[in-house]
Image (cartoon, helix red, strand yellow):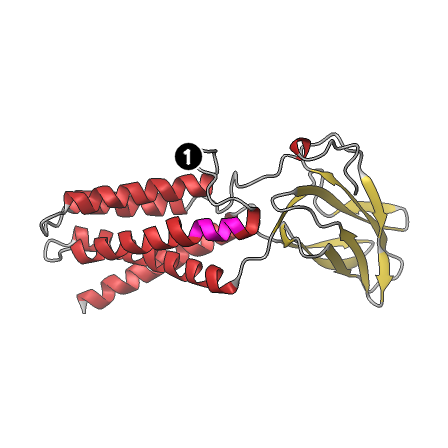
Amino acid sequence: MKKIAFWVIAVLITVSSAIYQRLSGPTYSIKEKTMINDSEIAYKLERSHENIKDYEIAIKVDNEEVAGHLIYKRHKTDDPWTKIPFVRREDSLIASLPKQPAAGKLEYKVILSSQGNEISLSGQNPVIIRFKGPVPALILIPHIFIMFLAILLSTRAGIAALDPKSNPRKFALWATGLLIVGGLILGPLVQKFAFGELWTGFPISFDLTDNKTLIAVIGWIAAVIAGRGGKPARRWVLGASILLLVVYLIPHSLLGSELDYFKTNPPSTLPK
């Protein structure tokens, strides 16, 4: 019964941390509602999009008096803002952002107007969207699944480390192995397809996702070494378990891959 309770706790912690990371990350879609002249408008603004096609923004607006336009420019450039009017298609307003190279980012604002009133859906600050290459499902799905299992087994190992009657060694070995496969093998493959680089963490660059994975792996390898010979190494295991949870709570893709437009073409010459 106690083992079942431990597993339930581990699952709840793992799922909660995964939900938190998903909702707090910089690529999470913005889903809100707003009012303009007594018309309630629900909208969804993406912050991540595959670069196989332009990103089409479609906002359902039944009130035909509501119009709008889209403005955008490339992120971290001195480009002038480009303005695109929304086109009505049945009950929706439609406009598109041009697709960008992998890791390219655009800043954009959606502005709606009616009877002289104007509102920006994102307020004063623009939405930043990052474009990425498509990742094959045969790589992406195992990566996500194995990383989830790694965090689950890591959490379970930490719980076992707190129980004097349990030996967390087997959980520690599984957590370490899964973390290496999911984070250091499949993770770089995902990044290669999405952004064109296998590794952008230390010592090459400062990608936070790569670096936090590296720190977590080092922590678990240290715990496994400390427990060689079958020793429980409870403090090491608990420390590695807590470390993985802490780094996992850092939003995914924060300080992630980002295209430097100045290293490709000058902003004034790159076509829009």
Instruction: Give x and y (percent) for residue 269.
Output: 79, 34
Q: Which quarter of the picture shows residue 217?
A: top left
Give the residue number, with chain letter if any, for mark 1.
202
**Residue drawn 43% across and 42% down?**
210
Badge 1: how crowded within 10 Å, few (<14), some, or many (20+)?
few
Q: Disc 1 marks which amino acid?
A: Phe
**Residue drawn 49% across and 53% down?**
190
In the rendered view, would you say 229 is above or below 15?
above
The quarter of the rendered structure image containing the N terminus is bottom left
**Residue drawn 27% across and 42% down?**
219
Instruction: Give x and y (percent) for residue 100.
Output: 69, 47
Query: Is 191 a magenta residue?
Result: yes
Instruction: Give x and y (percent) for residue 243.
Output: 31, 43
Q: Can the viewer see residue 243 in this picture?
A: no
Q: Is residue 64 left or right of residue 245?
A: right
Dot 1 lies on which element?
loop
Q: Is residue 107 left or right of residue 230?
A: right
Query: Is 103 a magenta residue?
Result: no
Q: Is residue 77 left or right of residue 220?
A: right
| Nearest to the observer: residue 118 or residue 209 | 209
Q: Which quarter of the picture shows residue 66?
A: bottom right
Q: Can the viewer see residue 35 in this picture?
A: yes
Q: How many marks?
A: 1
Q: What secondary structure is the magenta-colored segment mainly?
A: helix
Q: Which residues are magenta?
A: 187-192
**Residue drawn 84% across and 68% down?**
90
